[in-house]
Amino acid sequence: MRIFVAGASGLIGVRLVPLLTSAGHVVAGMTRSPEKAGTLKELGAEPVVVDVYDAPALTEAVEKFAPEIVFHQLTDLPDNIEDLASAGPRNSRMRTEGTGNLLQAAKVANARVIAQSISWEQEAEQARQQTAEHERRIRQSNGVVIRYGQFYGPGTYYPQTPPERPRIHIDDAARLTLASLDVPQGVTMVIDDRAL
């Protein structure tokens, strides 16, 4: 299968790409950072350097690769949890404009979209509404929404101690994301609520 991973250099992406290629899929890994293209190539993906906010270039890149599946693993979150509150507007733009551009590119390429979301209740009403709208747009495109628990493990906001539930180890999240290729249209949960 030909699979386009948007956000391939992110926490899930760098783990998902090798799983996909090991399973025999042909993968394009999208990043907006030219300096990350080499890493994606090492992981087994065909690097695609494009900004999700450049809709014409994004559509051209996706259509050229001709994927059957587009994974939406794009976020705009800071590396440090202390900076999370100030990142809200940037990540909201990713969920609205970025998602819209990616959905349009996938539609032109006649590809199915599998997109990340969250499984916990957000405190702010605006954030809840944006998440609901993000998910509605994915489902409306006959795609799959993956509601992840809070990530923990190497590279996450919780590298040592797991956060409150719902949660999922980042490596398990990537492994279960691979399994989403066989999930029907709708919503699926990727959480691990075992006692730790």
Image: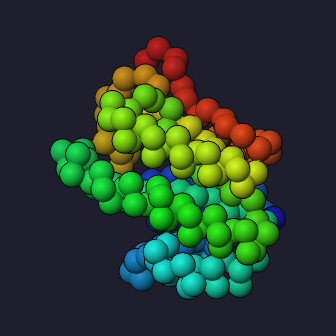
Left or right of 112 on screen, residue 81: left
The image quadrant where one finds the N terminus is bottom right
Q: Is residue 105 above or below residue 136?
A: below
Residue 149 in percent (x, y) is at 48, 33
Which residue corresponds to the image point at 73% horizontal and 68% vertical from the top-left? Answer: 107
Which residue corresponds to the image point at 51% horizontal and 32% vertical from the top-left? Answer: 119
Left or right of 49 on screen, residue 25: right
The answer to which quarter of the image holds residue 159 is: top left
Q: Is residue 136 above or below residue 169?
A: below
Which residue corresponds to the image point at 40% horizontal and 77% vertical from the top-left? Answer: 33
Extreme-left residue of the structure? 82
Which color scheme is applied? rainbow
The answer to which quarter of the image holds residue 23 is: bottom right
- Label total for image: 0
Q: Nearer the viewer, residue 190 or 119?
A: 119
Residue 21 in percent (x, y) is at 70, 63
Which residue corresponds to the image point at 45% horizontal and 29% vertical from the top-left? Answer: 120
Left or right of 139 on screen, residue 29: left
The answer to whether residue 12 shows anywhere in this view is: yes
Q: Is residue 92 above or below residue 29?
A: above
Residue 100 in percent (x, y) is at 56, 64
The answer to whether residue 38 shows anywhere in this view is: no
The image quadrant where one finds the C terminus is top left
Residue 155 in percent (x, y) is at 36, 49
